Amino acid sequence: MIEAVVATRGERLAGPAIARSPRAWLAAGWSVFQLYTAYAGMFDLLVQLPLHVAFAVALGFLTPATSVLPAPARDAREPAPVRRVRWLDSLLALLALGCGAYYVAENHRLVTRMALVDDPSSLDVLAGVLLVVLLLVASRRHIGGALVLLALLFAAYAFAGPWLPGFLSHGGVRFLKLVDQQTLTTEGVFGIPTLVSATYIFLFVTFGAVMARGGLLGFFTDLALAVAGATRGGAGKVAVISSGLFGMVNGSAIANAVTTGAFTIPLMRRAGYRAEFAAGVEATASMGGQLIPPVMGAAAFIMAETLGVPYWTIAVSAAIPGVLYFVAVGVMVHFEAARQGLPVLPRAELPRAGAVLRRDLHLLAGPAVLLYFLMTGRSPLFAGFWALVIAVLASWPRRATRIGPRAAAAVLVESAQGAMPVALACATVGIVVGVVSITGLGLKLAGGIVDLAQGNLFVTLVLAMLAALVLGTGLPTSATYIITSIMAAPALVQLGVPKLVAHMFVFYFGILADLTPPTAISTYATSSIAGADVWRTQWIAMMLALAGFVIPFSFAYDPALLLIGAGVGGVLLRTAAATLGIVMLGAGVIGYLVVPARLWERVVLLVGAALLISPGALSDALGVACLGIVLLSQRTSVRRRP
């Protein structure tokens, strides 16, 4: 799960490497601490969360800045480059751990003092400010400067309030009060985002690492080949299906793109797809892993905690839109293959579904346990821990998938490395959340958006979408969701949009922002594998994800797609209409339905798609009529051909 950046290839630390690498020992120790508290229960929050942040910051200093791109080719005779950690990085890592130790030593006093009333002591200020400074430095290294700059701007806003105009004005915040709120309570750096990172996110990153090590990716890929490999555009559909299945238990776009893309992109290239199209398909499908249950992106867990609802409620609501997203990508792949006349993969060269299921069906034990516990109302922490345990046990029947001591040690290290950027992002964005809370900026911005849109829901939705897409250009998905959820989502709620729907709307666009140029990170990885032009890949990925930009508007007007406010019949009708609309959208964009579409047919298809995706009986009927007109036209033209 999670949109975390994967550990650099060639840096997976396992076996003997653990014994000689302080970074690996620190990463493994952090994982053991997190797994222990997942099993035995958390410590007091002002112990658990500062230690979580301290581990992440320390590991951030001991880890070179990570690249998501595959390593460049190197002559086998050339010695591998050695990455050394500077002595200053080691010192800063020790300082971060020392700050965490301070919170442990002073825990009783910190939890019994009158927070935000009594001024903190000099040592409290020193430890808190030092940890925040170290956090910002580590975040700049692994996430980039945009989020750090945003946090600093919000901190400056807390002091500058009395001199600002209009609704931005506020009474100002004293330095000691801001330090107190940000570092000695659970309303700032150690707020809800960090709490979610320290519980659900870390655990599900570990679960994803176990699934990858335990052979689940190979199972999903072989199953996708068996099911769709011999159909029109089979290679592209294999990429969509395998990325979707792996994303269900992984939730990380980058990890998905690099792991599944290493197999699916060469497969698509051999089948005749253009390099940019193959890279775009894999990037778009990998991004969808954050949208589909049961394990979604980090922002989904933060949403559940923010709304105070069970995570299963979020997962169930996201199920239909998530499936529609993958249907949309698969439809475009099918029409593109038909338009190009690409050959079908020979059935004799593909695995058989029965043989694949007999070989690897037991690997689904972990995801099955996860689903069962979530459906029966257990917490994600409980469900994730025991699903992880079962997944490790399920890996043992076959030697090729077995997670023994060496592989388990590697999982501990990989999990911490994967969770580290997310933990840094969540703690850094906690600064923004804390300032918004202490200044009342959230309600002021919501009112400002409503006034700007003059109460028009569509304009407010567009403004919320633009806010998410612009913020997502420089921020991680989880940070984008958190900020838009406290600034844009309340404006939608004020106009009558249900709270869950409003948060799901900004959640979707926070994720889709990672497919928009110029910072569509997954496209850099996939285009590198495909040898494709990055800019063209990004525009193709946006085209393939077009339905993802439309679906949130559909459920904002009629939340039946989120299983809200409608019975079974209403949900089925809305889903059927949206599915048909997505098919027409794909046909109109690609320019192929039964045969290549003429310009006027493409226009009618796109109009019909918009009518079907928009809720309403009349619009649905008109959309179906548009489809009928184009089908009749194309079948007539086929009969007239000699």
Image (cartoon, grey):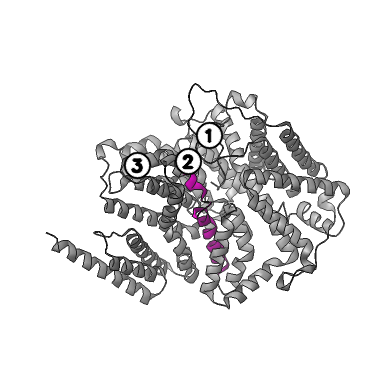
Camera-side residue of 226 and 604 = 604
Residue annotated with mark 3: 269
Asked which quadrant contains residue 41, the reply is top right
- Gap between marks 1 and 3, in whole Å? 23 Å
Which of discs 2 and 3 lies nearer the camera? The answer is 3
Residue 596 visible in the snapshot? yes
Q: Residue type at mark 3? A: Arg
Question: Upstream in the sequence, badge 2 or badge 3?
Answer: 2
Q: Please tell me whether mark 1 sits on a helix, a strand or a loop.
A: loop
- Gap between marks 2 and 3, in whole Å? 16 Å
Residue 178 on the magenta segment: no
Residue annotated with mark 1: 9
Camera-side residue of 367 and 188 = 188
Q: What's the residue at 52%, 56% (across, down)?
A: 513
- Determine whether label 1 and label 2 are within 8 Å by CB: yes
Residue annotated with mark 2: 258
